Image (cartoon, helix red, strand yellow):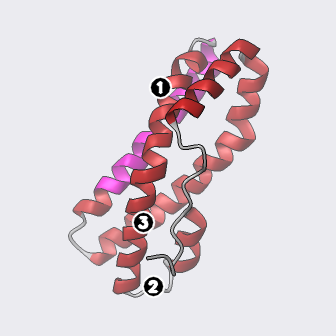
Amino acid sequence: MSLRIERELPGASVTEMGALYSDLLRFWSAGLLPHFSAENECMLARIAKRDDPGLKHAGRLQREHREMEDLVETMRLARTADDRRVALERFGIQLRDHIRWEERELFDWMQRMLSEDEMDAIGVYLAEHLPAEPIACPMPHDP
């Protein structure tokens, strides 16, 4: 979704931006919001109890999830197309940066700092609370 926003938003008409926003909302509701909720429920406490580095990681994880929720709400309440465009662009950047941070730093740190039992418990929780198949990002040609 972040790549779609990055590629499509700069040249998008108001109508095309509206379609992109609608696709984002579907992806948000079906995929990202449940994913963020599951991560918060099964990872935050385990990460935070690892003193200073863990508290920083847990804080960042929670803060970035909230910031993206706020951007979705900002888009919903936008009074102008330009306001929605700015929030949509910020969301795409935030999502891209969040994913990169999780993959490059957080998950590596968790594998080093959490016990095998804790990592297994996280895996079980996510398997029970998230769809078996990832939610595909709606593409421009999707209905």
**Residue beneath disc 1:** 41
Q: Of helix, strand and loop, which one carries label 3?
A: helix
Q: What secondary structure prevails in the magenta region?
A: helix
Magenta includes 53? yes
Residue 71's spot in the image, x, y percent?
37, 54
The residue positioned 43% from the left and 76% from the top of the image is: 143
Q: Of the numbered discs in the image, which one, if any, rests on residue 88?
A: 3
Q: Residue at x 62, y 16 (%)?
A: 52
Q: Of label 1 and label 2, which has the lower sequence position?
A: 2
Q: Of helix, strand and loop, which one carries label 2?
A: loop
Closest to the camera, between mark 3 and mark 1, is 1
Residue 63: percent from the left, percent from the top?
46, 36
Tell me the residue at 62%/25% (across/down): 124
Q: Quadrant of residue 82?
A: bottom left
Q: Amino acid at mark 2?
A: Ala
Mark closer to the observer (1, 2): 1
Return the residue at label 2: 12
